[in-house]
Image (cartoon, rainbow, N blue to C red):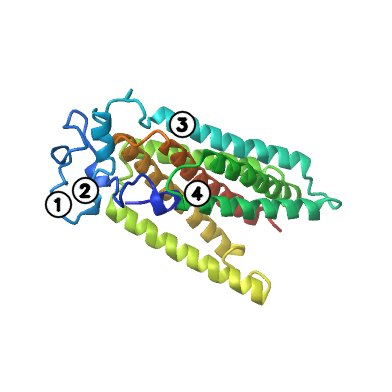
Amino acid sequence: MRSRNPVFSRRGFSRDNGYAGFNAAPQAGGPAVGTQQGNPYAQQAGNPYAQNPYAQQDLQYGAPPQAPAAAGRMTMDDVVARTATTLGLVVLTAVLSWVLLPVDEANIGKSYGIAVGAGLVAMVLALIQSFKRRAAPALILSYAALEGVFLGVISSAVSTYIADGVVAQAVMGTMAVFAGVLVAYKAGWIRVNRRFYGFVMAAALGFVLLMAVNLLFTVFGGGDGLGFRSGPLGIVFGVIGILLGACFLALDFKQVEDGIAYGAPREEAWLAAFGLTLTLVWIYMEFLRLLSILNSD
């Protein structure tokens, strides 16, 4: 089962086209994963959710994936450290671009041009990493730096021309969603299973298609297109976008949890950080768009 993030949907924590299945996570005190006896679903032929994608790694390391100090294995500390590094770079370059690329009348064209260019390159780097078989820290950090430049200029423009204080509200909203989903996930209020995954993916597909159609009408028809990003409909779709981002976070948390439980290699922590960063950027942009609509004349 995979999340929306390209890093997870294309590859995620997988080996040999296997999945870290949501229904096959090892239980504390149970047999070691990495053998068929340790996976209660291993005997279900044709069930892609039933296989431990790190079975070979478990045999190689010779220790159950639950062992927190196993050398070469991803831990929660690894994920937290890599995510903090990636997000920290996004924030740092966003602040620098806000200061060094002003959006006043004299510099707005130049600042916008640099921001759009950085955003496009960041998108290309994200796609390249998504299709790579291994994590490339330099690629991920480059994406984070360029994404920060884009976010910094856009945030500065929104704060300058729409409403001062909107950026702080969007940041706090993003943090609140992250904390809320994490608490709900750890408390078991969110059950991430196949039904949840199917619902989220169907909703995400519909959302993306509608936004693509709206963009086409905007480009070729002018104005606000079909109005999905402005006015009352824009508010509705902004809320939907934030809710989808929250669902993506739950999927990402499950992927990380399963990767740790199955003994993912330590380098996978960079992929976890990359995927979580993509989702948090999504949520922030949806908050910024929603607040812009609510504060615009």
Q: Quadrant of residue 212?
A: bottom right
- Give the foreground label among 4 and 2: 4
Q: Quick check: 103 left or right of 256?
A: right
What is the number of the mark on residue 129?
4
Mark 3 surroundings within 10 Å by alpha-carbon count, few (fewer than 14), some (14 through 19), many (20 or more): some
Do callouts 3 and 4 mark residues in contact (Cβ within 8 Å)? no
Do callouts 1 and 2 mark residues in contact (Cβ within 8 Å)? yes
What is the number of the mark on residue 80?
3
Mark 2 surroundings within 10 Å by alpha-carbon count, few (fewer than 14), some (14 through 19), many (20 or more): many
- Tell me which label, 3 or 1, sits earlier in the chain: 1
Mark 4 surroundings within 10 Å by alpha-carbon count, few (fewer than 14), some (14 through 19), many (20 or more): many
Q: Give how far across and how far down residue 276 sits, in percent.
A: 47, 42
- What's the distance in space between the residues labelled 3 and 2, CA to CA? 27 Å
Q: Quick check: 190 left or right of 87?
A: left
What is the number of the mark on residue 50?
2
Q: Which residue is mark 1?
A: 44
What is the number of the mark on residue 110?
none
Residue at 16% x, 46% y is 42
Give, as a three-letter code, the residue at label 3.
Answer: Val
Q: The C terminus appears in which quarter of the rendering?
A: bottom right
- What's the distance in space between the residues labelled 3 and 1, CA to CA? 34 Å
- Tell me which label, 3 or 2, sits earlier in the chain: 2
Give, as a three-letter code, the residue at label 1.
Answer: Gln
- What's the distance in space between the residues labelled 1 and 4, CA to CA? 33 Å
Residue at 58% x, 45% y is 143
Give, as a three-letter code, the residue at label 2.
Answer: Ala
Do callouts 1 and 4 mark residues in contact (Cβ within 8 Å)? no
Badge 2 element: helix
- Give the foreground label among 3 and 2: 2
Is residue 145 or residue 233 the one in the foreground? Answer: 145
Residue 40 in view (yes/no) = yes
